[in-house]
Amino acid sequence: MLLLLQTPTQDPNFHFLALVMGWIVTVLIAAFALAIIYKMVKGDINLMYLIAGEEGDASLSRFQFLVFTFVIALGLFLIILSNNPPTFPTAIPGGILALLGISGGSYVTAKAVDANAAKPPATQVVVTPTPAPAAAVVVNAAADQNVN
Amino acid sequence: MTFLINFARYEFGTLLGVFAAVITYQFLTGRINMSGLLSEKTKAGLGGISAARVQLLLFTLAIAFYILAQIIQSHSFPEIETKWLLMLGGSHSIFLGAKGVSSLFSSEPR
């Protein structure tokens, strides 16, 4: 659609083809999204453990990652759709990227802390020093008799 | 062509709204498990409310609402000042620090 608007062409066949492709993509995306929504509502896509950790309890690090991801993605969609014609924003501020980095880094770090805590403690091996063997004394009685 | 653009605009907006509504509804009705979100987690089970988790949740929601409100108002991403990022980073550090300390020094770490 953007190509259609930004590169005016006098070829009607290209114009018609781009229009048909635009409708196909739009309808396909709508169909996929509606199928996903239907399955989410019906329960075939189970969201019970959407923000749960390995133990099954809700994880705050996952929740905050989900919140910021949704906010930034939703904001991006709103910005694109609010432009006429719809266009990608020219610049994304570094603060937004830093925000996503902090959120994602915190999520990964929390997972690392959980994984480290779940590891069993290292077994201790105690080594007892063995006493040195007594020096062997060999008595050669036959040799002594020969000397004598 | 203009009709297609407007149709796609309303379609994407509606689908996003429905997605958000379904997920919010499942959060509110308990179909998405939120038990233990603010509780200390030990091997023995869930403990009491953790102050580090509460402060992280509050900061997260505050900054998320601020960003969303700025986007709706100005139709562009806001410039986030360094002090807000430092505050959020500090909040995450407190949360992760508390998590690490509880996993290291609790009698039954998890």
Image: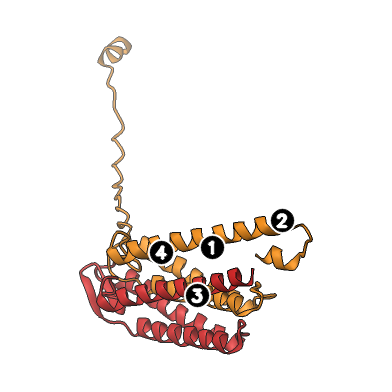
Real-space Cα separation, disc 2 to disc 1, in angstroms:
18 Å
Residue at the farthest front position:
A12
Dot 2 and dot 4 residues touching (CB under 8 Å): no
- Chain B colour in the picture: red
User: Which quarter of the rendering shows the C terminus of chain B?
Assistant: bottom left
Residue at the farthest left position:
B44
Q: Which residue is mark 2?
A: A14
> Helix, strand, or loop for circle 4?
helix
- How many discs mark residues in the rendered view? 4
Q: Which residue is mark 4?
A: A34
Real-space Cα separation, disc 3 to disc 4, in angstroms:
13 Å
Q: Amino acid at mark 4?
A: Leu
Q: Nearer the viewer, residue A42 or A102?
A: A42
How many other residues sit within 10 Å of disc 4, few (<14), some (14-19) or many (≥20)? some
Q: Nearer the viewer, residue B17 or A138?
A: B17
Q: Residue at x 31, y 82 (%)?
A: B50
Residue A56 visible at all: yes
- Chain A colour in the picture: orange
Mark number displayed over residue B13: 3
Do the residues marked 2 and 3 share a common chain? no
Q: Amino acid at mark 2?
A: Phe
Q: Amino acid at mark 1?
A: Thr
Do the residues marked 1 and 3 share a common chain? no
Residue A56 drawn at (x, y percent):
27, 65
Real-space Cα separation, disc 2 to disc 4, in angstroms:
30 Å
Q: Quadrant of residue A67?
A: bottom left
Q: Residue at x 79, y 61 (%)?
A: A10
